[in-house]
Image (tube, helix red, strand yellow):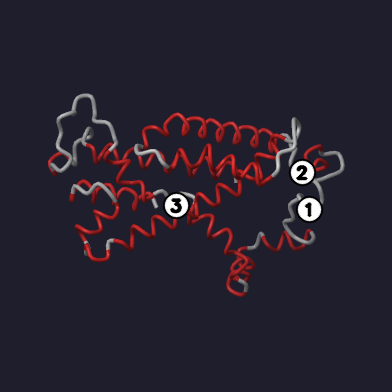
Amino acid sequence: SAYGFCLIGRLCAVTQAMSYRQAWARTVDPRNSWMPAWACVLVAVSSVTTYNMVLAETLPALTRPFFELPRSTALLTVTTFCLLPLCLLKELSSLAPYSGIGLAAMFYTAVVMTQRYWYGHYQEGEHQPLWEALSDEQRPMFGGNDDDVNAMNDWKTVLSTFLTHPQSYVTIISMLSTSFMAHYNAPKYYWELPPAPNNSNSNNNDKSNQHNYNSPLHRYDSIVAASFFGSMLLMSTIA
């Protein structure tokens, strides 16, 4: 996924394309450049729909101690006043403050979950406050009994279950395939990358600069690698 993200930036540098569709038109065929454009639109719409569903369930739960917020009202409010203005922004640099808030929230969540796991707060039992606070419908199930749980720890059993009942893994496969998907914004990330302080006059299409540590391509690849690695590490910690 990270390698594909880097390839898109490199392709934009070579072809001087400003968008995913333009890069396709200059390298493949301009007559069917609408295909990746519509694919990106569908992916973005699906992502926004997913975020809407999560936020519509989360916001009423957060406001419940203070007042009751209907799910439909929460969905309309978040879509109209949060997601829609963010989607209409022309430059990704405007999202930097909101990205910082999101990263801080993710780090805070990882720290709290690690602390709770370390002290055994996620263990099931009658004297566990977190377990008792959940209703029967909200409590997770990792197997019908201890034998089922131990069986799922065997890789042969997991592989056999995947081959005989692949539909059981559709959800997790979908989550893993879309968790790091932002490739339709790769051209914007590349072209909005600020120049290096001592290399502000460099040419993005100069191949001699590709091996320079201050070249746009090298800095772009470094940022992408660090971002994907950090995201993977953070997601793995929470998972």
User: What percent of the width, then of the height, locates residue 146?
Assistant: 78, 58
User: What percent of the width, then of the height, locates residue 45?
Assistant: 47, 53
- Ranked by sequence position, the earlier of labels 1 and 3 is 3
Which residue lies under the disc numbered 1?
137
User: What percent of the width, then of the height, locates residue 233?
Assistant: 50, 41
What separation in Å lies between label 2 and label 3 (alpha carbons)?
Answer: 37 Å
- Residue 37 located left or right of residue 117: left
Q: Residue at x 60, y 49 (%)?
A: 53
Q: Nearer the viewer, residue 107 or 195?
A: 195
What separation in Å lies between label 1 and label 2 (alpha carbons)?
Answer: 17 Å
Instruction: Tell me the tag on residue 123.
Output: 2
- Residue 14 located left or right of residue 137: left
What separation in Å lies between label 1 and label 3 (alpha carbons)?
Answer: 31 Å
Instruction: Tell me the tag on residue 1.
Output: none
* Contact check, label 1 and label 3, Cβ < 8 Å: no
Which residue lies under the disc numbered 3?
44
Front label number (2 vs 3): 3
- Compared with residue 49, is residue 192 higher up or lower down, i.e. above or below? above
Where on the picture, by quarter, is residue 121? top right
Q: Residue at x 64, y 68 (%)?
A: 157
User: What percent of the width, then of the height, locates residue 131?
Assistant: 79, 43
For badge 3, the amino acid type reads Ala
Mark 3: secondary structure: helix
